[in-house]
């Protein structure tokens, strides 16, 4: 038993050293002009010894902190990391290349003793707090449709920047309401780049063979876990974006529809549209609200097409949202059901040609 314990500890020690060496090498070979390196002692001081937890996830916890100049920050402490520090390196490498109003700003990071990422503080938290089930204890209040509409456009613009505006194309692979942060004016900012992948701007298809399928059940694109559907590309982010917008519409967890998050809810939407459904979700106050909600629904249906080739680029998504509703059509009907925790399902398609 003593021999087994000794080898286990030695193996753990070697893995820990390898992680540190990987991160040190990454820092040595990259320049971070606007991002500061902090010590673990600095992190403890700015968070008052991790006294104010404001979030938690599979990666670890998020704490509210304050820089020496009084600027509020959010400190993401990574405790459940995998591999040899790849997720930490991935996030720093990805977000350090960005500068956009719809991308959260990385202020600094630390890798000594514990790995931590320091972000600008978002006073309104994440998008998931304002959408979803009416009975959700996390839902603070209902946002106006004008605000939801602008949030949808802002997320799309942020993704467009990642896909086309950076020197290196960044594919996020984990777009969902929890990873959309809102500032004091409810401007959306894409966060959490732990699963992101960098690739050359000319590359449209990426290989995930080294990393395996990545994403969150309910938002992950079908081609990511079922390669026979199509190639993994920036269109995989478009699918996740579409699912996020559908959540903003409140369709997946609307008690009145009898639709649950694990069911094939797009089929229900198509059935209602084909029957001339007068789409009027909660909070609609006038025709402008109704038009914005309808545009969000139609665009989201285009984004979640099973075949990646049938989805619009994120640039086209922005154009569709900002354009006239008269130019939008109901997309082909996809019978593909989003994967559940139990088992992925195969796909099939049929078409709908009705014009809205």
Image (cartoon, rainbow, N blue to C red):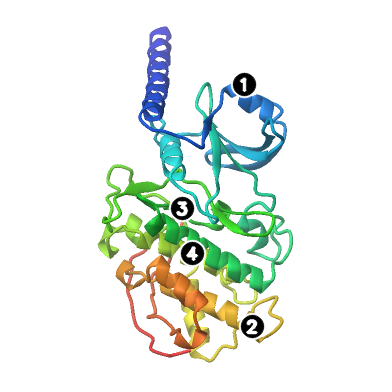
Q: Mark 2 and mark 3: span between their CA atoms?
A: 31 Å
| The N terminus, quarter of image | top left
| Residue 79 visible at all | no
Q: Mark 4 and mark 3: span between their CA atoms?
A: 14 Å
Q: Quick check: 147 left or right of 259? A: right
User: Which badge, 4 or 3, is on the more N-terminal residue?
Assistant: 4
User: Which badge, 1 or 2, is on the more N-terminal residue?
Assistant: 1
| Residue 104 visible at all | yes
Q: Mark 4 falls on what kind of element? A: helix
User: Which badge, 2 or 4, is on the more N-terminal residue?
Assistant: 4
Q: Which residue is mark 1?
A: 41
The number of numbered badges drawn on the structure is 4
Q: Is residue 124 above or below residue 333?
A: above
- Marks 1 and 4 close (CB-CB < 8 Å): no
Q: Mark 2 and mark 4: span between their CA atoms?
A: 20 Å
Q: Mark 1 and mark 2: span between their CA atoms?
A: 52 Å
User: Which badge, 2 or 3, is on the more N-terminal residue?
Assistant: 3
- Residue drawn 31% across the image and 49% down it: 199
Q: Mark 3 falls on what kind of element? A: loop
Q: Mark 2 falls on what kind of element? A: helix
Q: Which residue is mark 2?
A: 288
Q: Which residue is mark 4?
A: 156
Label 2 or label 3, whichever lies nearer to me, is 2
- Residue 174: which disc? 3
* Few, some or many residues within 10 Å of mark 1 (<14, 14–19, 20+): few
Quadrant in the rendering for residue 9? top left
The picture places residue 218, in percent across and down from the top left corner, at: 48, 59
Q: Is residue 117 above or below residue 129?
A: above
* Few, some or many residues within 10 Å of mark 2 (<14, 14–19, 20+): few
Q: Quick check: 66 left or right of 264? A: right
Q: Is residue 232 above or below residue 308?
A: above
The picture places residue 305, in percent across and down from the top left corner, at: 38, 71
């Amino acid at each position: 038993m003593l021999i087994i314990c000794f080898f286990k500890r030695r193996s753990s020690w070697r893995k820990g050293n390898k992680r540190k060496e990987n991160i040190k090498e990454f820092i040595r070979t990259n320049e971070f002009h606007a991002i500061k390196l902090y010590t673990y002692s600095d992190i403890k001081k700015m968070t008052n010894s991790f006294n104010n937890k404001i979030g938690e996830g599979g990666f670890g916890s998020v704490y509210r902190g304050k820089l020496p100049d009084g600027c509020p920050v959010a400190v993401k402490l990574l405790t459940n990391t995998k591999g040899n520090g790849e997720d930490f390196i991935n996030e720093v490498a990805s977000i350090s290349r960005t500068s956009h109003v719809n991308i959260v700003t990385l202020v600094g990071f630390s890798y000594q003793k514990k790995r931590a990422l320091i972000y600008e503080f978002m006073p309104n938290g994440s998008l998931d707090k304002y959408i979803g089930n009416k009975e959700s204890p996390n839902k603070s209040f209902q946002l106006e449709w004008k605000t939801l509409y602008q949030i949808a456009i802002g997320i799309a613009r942020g993704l467009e920047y990642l896909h086309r505006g950076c020197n290196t194309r960044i594919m996020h692979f984990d777009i969902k309401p929890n990873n959309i942060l809102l500032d004091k004016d409810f401007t959306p900012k894409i966060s959490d780049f732990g699963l992101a992948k960098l690739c050359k701007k000319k590359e449209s298809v990426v290989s995930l063979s080294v990393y395996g399928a990545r994403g969150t059940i309910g938002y992950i694109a079908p081609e990511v876990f079922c390669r026979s559907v199509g190639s993994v590309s920036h269109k995989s982010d478009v699918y996740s974006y579409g699912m996020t917008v559908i959540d903003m519409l409140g369709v997946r967890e609307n008690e009145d529809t009898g639709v649950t998050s694990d069911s094939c809810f797009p089929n229900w939407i198509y059935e209602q549209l084909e029957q001339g459904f007068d789409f009027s979700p909660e909070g609609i106050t006038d025709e402008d609200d109704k038009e914005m909600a309808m545009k969000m629904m139609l665009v989201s249906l285009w984004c979640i097409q099973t075949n990646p080739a049938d989805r619009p680029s994120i640039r086209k998504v922005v154009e569709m949202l900002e354009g006239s509703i008269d130019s939008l059509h109901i997309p082909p009907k996809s019978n593909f059901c989003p994967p559940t925790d139990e088992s992925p399902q195969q796909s099939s398609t049929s078409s709908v040609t009705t014009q809205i």
